[in-house]
């Protein structure tokens, strides 16, 4: 959805028209090219909790946006985990669907320091400023290494930011400032502004979170500095930026549904300053343009209506008549239209030992919603209500540079004071900037990493003259997964020595057998190289020397709780290991497993195992082989699933959407399933729409088809003997969050339960036909207070975050 359509406004200020230069028109057209062809993506990640121990698992769900909308651009997501020294602990790759993806990070048993750093990006984001990658420090509680509350180093600093970018002599300038400690945490300051001769000009003090502002009219040839005291009473002296002898000043004030701006020029400024242009742009879209005639005046101003704009960062840029950018300012537009409100209802609450809880998530409107939900120990998860979350990240911190303290504070309420406090944030942080000189020359960004269509298998034949490769040559591949299932692929000859196919999804390492169809000796005559197109990532990260490694005084309560849980987990671990070893060596006699359960254990894994699904055993169905394909077999068997076999390609529909198809848990299209003989199929599982199963959560339902393995009757696998082979790396393996069921007789249920994450569901999906999702989970043995966090988006780009406490 293009939220900027029809919002472009042109204004003449004051009322005098002057010719629009062709160069200016070129910049306008180039901005349109950037907006449509080079979208800037940003990422928010919902983690199951805020603090972890070495050896534990981080569960996450990533949401990818382009401007104010869910991104439909990128297909591959990357995440790197590094320690305090910059050592890469893990590199993950995930497929993106419905503008999101999910995964898990298994932390090593030993971690240096009290945090790990998360860095996340898409392939497309690698082409642009890396300052806008997702970056976050995750707290790590080391049982043996943490001695308690750490003292904070005394280093303090202050920065000054003239509004518009420069101090200009003879013009009143507004100067914002930001004071912080070594770790970027805000400190209160007060001070005196002085000129070069030491004369006191004014006194100032911070207004909010170490930030403030003051007006000053500098004198040509002068210099300014401040003498200030920090929160510890220590005195410092810091200079302000140098003063320009002449130029223009841009100032802005945020008001309800409008932005007021003023422009002033020096009396002796160059002629180019007499005819100016101011533009407003948001997410690379030009939304406002005014021509300012200062031929006879030194100052002018105007009003930008913003009520129809999406909430977010609006950038103002002032150009001279020869199209030189001379001042820039960012303001925040908050029209309070960015939320949607799911209902999170607690149906059954039981915080007793292993108590069963039931909650319902209901989205009242008809738009599709994509949510994630976490339930954690409420005393162990040190959540600050104003920490960065999906709302503050996708509206604010994802579009500006630098650390923002308590960013959600500016969205939690609608008080008038927040407008000015948020404006201080805008004046003291950098933002996404155009390289205006490139736009003026009609230059577009260099794309080193083009858009990808998921995984690709690209083959290059080296050492053979490409002209000797037949034009109709092709390559057959057989992908052999770790569970012994196989997938056949056909790679066409692209050009020269290259073969390839894209749009693939497979996980982990896959043993791949291959053979050329026309010249079967080609693999013996040449060197064959394979690539899946995944970005290999960095070998190391920048050490985070300024990352706060200790704990503040207000962390003491949940630090104590985490020490208790970590100690209990360490005490229980030997018993758990012994129990697992015993279960592996003996047969536990319990309830007799059904045929469906046996099939499920044999064929399925991860998100596809268990669950509420229709299961079909084709090995033991004497009539299965009489069907022409699996679509004909499924017709009429599943309520609500409509399958049409009229025409060359079958079509499917379930609740208005098309079900996702998987062959041996790799997503494929209809033709791949249609070409798989029914005699080769052992089992089919059909998951209902909104089940959260499969790639993207199964919004239109998921059909998982499994081919026969060793020991099954009628196996029709091709012989792999004598074929060349290689090992291909797919997406990072996916693991399902383990949810205990204390109603069954699992021997592992005898072990004490001290989990701090009780439940994690990365895909809670709703649509017009499925507005409600019911979730059940059990408490552990020790928690008396549970925290539920629900975050997500809808298809219109609206955001939601709900926090509920059970106790």
Image (tube, rainbow, N blue to C red):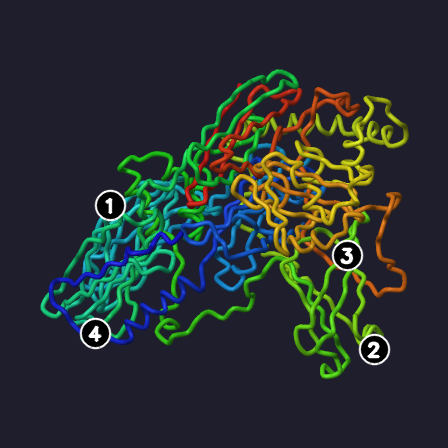
Q: Which of the marked residues, 2 or 3, is nearer the chain's N terminus? A: 3
What percent of the width, then of the height, locates residue 524?
85, 74
Q: Between label 1 and label 3, give the one nearer the viewer.
A: 3
Q: Between label 1 and label 2, give the one nearer the viewer.
A: 2
What percent of the width, then of the height, locates residue 521?
84, 75
For disc 3, the neighbor class at 10 Å (few under 14, some 14 to 19, many from 20) is many
Q: Is 206 placed above or below 437 here?
A: above
Q: Between label 4 and label 3, give the one nearer the viewer.
A: 3
- The numbered disc on residue 479 is 3
Element at label 1: loop
Cβ atoms at labels 1 and 4 below 8 Å apart? no
Distance from disc 1 to disc 3, alpha carbons, whole Å, reads 58 Å
Picture residue at 58% right of the left edge, 48% below the top: 118
In the displayed structure image, the side of residue 457 where residue 225 appears, left or right: left
For disc 4, the neighbor class at 10 Å (few under 14, some 14 to 19, many from 20) is some
- Which residue is tagged 4? 272
Distance from disc 2 to disc 3, alpha carbons, whole Å, reads 23 Å
Distance from disc 1 to disc 4, alpha carbons, whole Å, reads 32 Å
What percent of the width, then of the height, locates residue 286?
31, 61
Element at label 3: strand
Q: Which of the marked residues, 1 or 3, is nearer the chain's N terminus? A: 1
For disc 2, the neighbor class at 10 Å (few under 14, some 14 to 19, many from 20) is few
Q: Between label 4 and label 2, give the one nearer the viewer.
A: 2
Distance from disc 4 to disc 3, alpha carbons, whole Å, reads 66 Å
- Which residue is tagged 1? 257
Distance from disc 4 to disc 2, alpha carbons, whole Å, reads 68 Å
Distance from disc 1 to disc 2, alpha carbons, whole Å, reads 70 Å
- Which residue is tagged 2? 525
For disc 1, the neighbor class at 10 Å (few under 14, some 14 to 19, many from 20) is some
Picture residue at 38% right of the left edge, 35% below the top: 412
């Amino acid at each position: 959805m293009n939220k900027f359509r029809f919002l472009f406004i042109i204004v003449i200020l004051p009322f005098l028209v002057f010719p629009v230069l062709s160069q200016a028109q070129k910049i306008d057209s180039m901005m349109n090219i950037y907006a449509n062809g080079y979208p800037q993506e940003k990422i928010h990640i919902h983690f199951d909790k805020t603090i972890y121990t070495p050896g534990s698992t981080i569960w996450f769900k990533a949401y990818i946006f382009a401007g104010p909308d869910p991104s439909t651009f990128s297909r591959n997501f990357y995440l790197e985990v590094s320690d305090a020294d910059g050592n890469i602990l893990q590199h993950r790759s995930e497929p993106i669907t419905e503008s999101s993806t999910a995964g898990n990070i298994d932390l090593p048993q030993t971690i240096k320091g009290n945090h790990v750093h998360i860095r996340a990006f898409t392939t497309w984001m690698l082409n642009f400023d890396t300052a806008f990658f997702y970056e976050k420090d995750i707290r790590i509680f080391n049982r043996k290494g943490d001695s308690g509350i750490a003292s904070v180093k005394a280093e303090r600093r202050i920065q000054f930011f003239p509004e518009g970018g420069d101090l200009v002599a003879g013009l009143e300038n507004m100067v914002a400032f930001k004071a912080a400690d070594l770790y970027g945490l805000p400190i209160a300051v007060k001070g005196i502004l002085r000129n070069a001769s030491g004369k006191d000009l004014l006194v100032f003090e911070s207004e909010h979170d170490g930030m403030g502002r003051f007006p000053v009219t500098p004198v040509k040839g002068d210099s300014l500095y401040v003498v200030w005291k920090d929160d510890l009473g220590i005195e410092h002296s810091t200079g302000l930026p140098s003063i320009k002898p002449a130029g223009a000043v841009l100032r802005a004030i945020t008001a309800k549904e409008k932005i007021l701006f003023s422009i002033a020029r020096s009396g002796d400024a160059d002629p180019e300053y007499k005819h100016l242009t101011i533009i407003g742009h948001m997410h690379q879209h030009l939304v406002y343009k005014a021509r300012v005639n200062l031929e006879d005046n030194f100052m002018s101003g105007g009003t930008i209506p913003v009520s129809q704009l999406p909430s977010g960062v609006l950038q103002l840029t002032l150009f001279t008549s020869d199209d030189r950018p001379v001042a820039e300012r960012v303001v925040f537009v908050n029209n309070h239209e960015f939320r949607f409100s799911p209902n999170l209802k607690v149906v059954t609450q039981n915080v007793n030992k292993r108590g069963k809880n039931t909650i319902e998530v209901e989205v009242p409107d008809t738009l599709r919603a994509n949510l994630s939900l976490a339930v954690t120990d409420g005393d162990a998860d040190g959540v600050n209500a104003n920490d960065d979350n999906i709302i503050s990240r996708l509206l604010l911190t994802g579009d500006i540079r630098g650390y923002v303290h308590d960013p959600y504070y500016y969205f939690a309420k609608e008080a008038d004071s927040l407008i000015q406090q948020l404006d201080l944030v805008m004046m003291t942080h950098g933002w996404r900037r155009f390289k205006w000189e490139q736009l003026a020359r009609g230059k577009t960004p260099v794309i080193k990493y083009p858009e990808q269509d998921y995984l690709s298998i690209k083959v290059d034949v080296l050492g053979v003259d490409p002209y000797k490769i037949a034009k109709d040559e092709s390559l057959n591949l057989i992908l052999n997964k770790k569970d012994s299932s196989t997938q056949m692929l056909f790679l066409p000859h692209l050009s020269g020595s290259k073969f390839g196919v894209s749009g693939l999804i497979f996980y982990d390492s896959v043993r791949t057998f291959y053979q050329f169809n026309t010249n079967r000796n080609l693999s013996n005559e040449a060197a064959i190289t394979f690539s899946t197109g995944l970005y290999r990532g960095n070998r190391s990260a920048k050490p985070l020397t300024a990352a706060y490694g200790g704990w503040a005084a207000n962390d003491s309560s949940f630090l104590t709780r985490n020490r208790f849980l970590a100690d209990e987990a360490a005490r229980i671990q030997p018993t758990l290991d012994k129990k697992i070893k015993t279960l592996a060596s003996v047969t536990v006699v319990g309830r007799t497993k059904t045929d469906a359960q046996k099939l499920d254990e044999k064929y399925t894994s991860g998100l596809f195992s268990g669950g509420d699904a229709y299961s079909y055993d084709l090995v033991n169905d004497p009539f299965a082989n009489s069907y022409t394909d699996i679509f004909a077999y499924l017709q009429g068997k599943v309520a609500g699933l409509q399958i049409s076999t009229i025409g060359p390609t079958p079509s499917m529909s379930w609740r208005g959407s098309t079900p996702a198809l998987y062959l041996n848990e790799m997503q494929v299209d209809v033709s791949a399933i249609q070409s798989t003989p029914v005699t080769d199929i052992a089992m089919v599982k059909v998951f209902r729409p909104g089940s959260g199963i499969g790639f993207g959560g199964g919004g239109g339902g998921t059909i998982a088809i499994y081919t026969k393995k060793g020991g099954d009757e009628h196996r029709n696998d091709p012989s792999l003997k004598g074929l060349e082979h290689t090992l291909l790396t797919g997406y990072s393996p996916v693991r399902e969050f383990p949810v205990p069921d204390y109603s069954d007789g699992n021997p592992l249920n005898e072990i004490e339960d001290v989990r701090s994450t009780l439940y994690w569901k990365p895909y809670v999906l709703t649509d017009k036909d499925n507005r409600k999702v019911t979730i059940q989970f059990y408490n552990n043995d020790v928690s008396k207070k549970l925290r539920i966090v629900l975050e997500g988006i809808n298809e219109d780009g609206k955001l939601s975050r709900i926090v509920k406490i059970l106790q």
